[in-house]
Amino acid sequence: MKVILRKDVAALGDAGEVVSVKNGYANNYLIPQGMATRATEGTLKALETEKKQQARKVELQRVSARELAQKIEQMVLKVQAKAGESGKLFGTVTAGDIADALKVAGVEIDRRKITLEAPVKLLGKYEAEAKLFSDVTVKVTFEVEAEGAEA
């Protein structure tokens, strides 16, 4: 029997795939659990339409991520941190600090999507990388300033 998987099933396939399974497996397990539906002419057409809509949705997300990337590339963020006389920081600047600075600038990015090449322990200009979409990454330029320093 041919079925359309609605959820990822280990050792069988991913959601949206049409697979061939034994009748008992489909009727007694996959279909009642909501993991699959019978592959009829109507459901196959519905699946095709659903895939087209999903592709359009993904493309819209990719376009908005690229627009956001262009906006971020033009920014130079200011990150305030406590520092000693020699310019050495008390602690480090983290991805969370960069995410907070982006939020102040009007851009929300999850801190887990921001990566730093090395820990930031001195005052100065640095770059981090933010992953906005599966294939869209952007360099985030930020400047670490001493807390209380006048801009």
Image (cartoon, grey):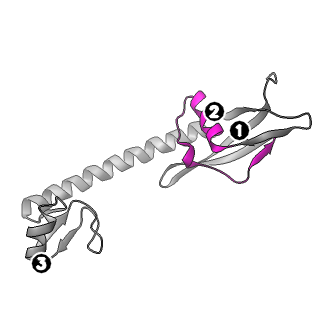
Is label 2 or label 1 in front? 2
**Looking at the rendered structure, which numbered label has been put on residue 69?**
none
User: What residue is shown with label 3?
Assistant: 22
Tell me the tag on residue 142: 1
> What is the CA distance from the residue labelled 2 to the residue labelled 3?
56 Å
Q: Which element is circle 1 on?
A: strand
Q: Amino acid at mark 2?
A: Ala
SS label for mark 2: helix
Question: Which quadrant: the N terminus?
Answer: bottom left
How far across and how far down the image is residue 121, in percent? 79, 45
Which residue lies under the disc numbered 2?
101
**Residue 144 drawn at (x, y percent):** 76, 36
Are discs 2 and 1 less than 8 Å apart at CB?
A: yes
Residue stretch in magenta: 94-123
Image: 150 above or below 119: above
Viewer can see residue 99: yes
Q: Are marks 3 and 1 in contact (CB under 8 Å)?
A: no
For the point 60% across and 38% down, which residue is it?
99
Pick whichever of labels 3 and 1 is earlier in the sequence. 3
Magenta-colored stretch includes residue 116: yes
Q: Can residue 105 be seen?
A: no
Identify the amino acid type marked 3.
Answer: Lys
